[in-house]
Image: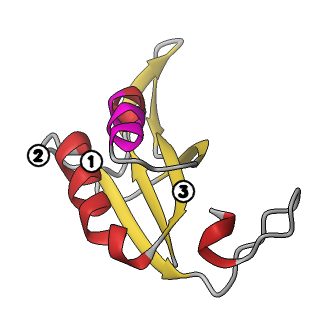
Amino acid sequence: MKQITAIVRPEMLEPLKDALFDAGVSGATISEVQGFGQQHGWKEYYRGTEVLLNMVPKVTVMMVVADDHVDALIETICSVARTGEVGDGKIFVAPVDEAVRIRTGERGPNAL
């Protein structure tokens, strides 16, 4: 099993959710986050004073999937979330040693 964590633009959330449902993802955890990367923020004016906002709003989508689904899901995420501009996001993949469904006690891939 692998944990896929995708950090994407907030406006990509709905199309990404639809694509993940279509790809058969059985569950995901979604969080609104802020961060910085190559974008380095942007300038805005507040009461006539220039303010550098260096925290950019993003959405994190985290899911645990079977090993054989990882490559297809990465392609799905990239095809939906890619605009070609700086700030499209990142995808991280990490191993998952165990999963347990609390309600039933099922373990491993059956718990997904």
Q: Residue at x 37, y 31 (%)?
A: 18
* Mark earlier in primary sequence (3, 2): 3
Which residue was labeled with disc 3? 62
Q: Name the residue tied to disc 1.
A: 88
Height in image: 23 above or below 97?
A: above
Expressed as whole percent of the image width and height from the top left, the position of residue 109 reads 59, 73
Q: Amino acid at mark 2?
A: Gly
Residue furthest to the left in view is 84
Task: Tell whether position 86 is magenta.
Answer: no
**Mark 3 and mark 2: Cα distance apart in space:** 22 Å
User: Residue at the location (15% across, 44% down)?
Assistant: 85
Residue 41 is tagged as: none
Percent across and percent down for residue 36 are 44, 54
Which residue is depicted at the point 66% across and 78% down?
Answer: 108
Which residues, given as a range, are shown in magenta?
15-22
Q: CA distance from mark 1 to mark 2?
A: 7 Å
Q: Nearer the viewer, residue 28 or 24?
A: 24
Q: Is residue 17 magenta?
A: yes
Q: Secondary structure at mark 3?
A: strand
How was the colour assigned to the protein in this rendering? secondary structure
In this rendering, does residue 39 appear at all? yes
For the residue labelled by badge 1, is the local secondary structure a helix, a strand or a loop?
loop
Count residues near mark 2 (Cα–Cα under 10 Å), then give few for <14, some for 14-19, many for 20+.
few
Residue pointed to by mark 2: 84
Label 1 Cα crowd, 10 Å radius (few <14 / some 14-19 / many 20+): some
Image height of 87 relative to 15, above or below: below
Quadrant position of residue 9: top left
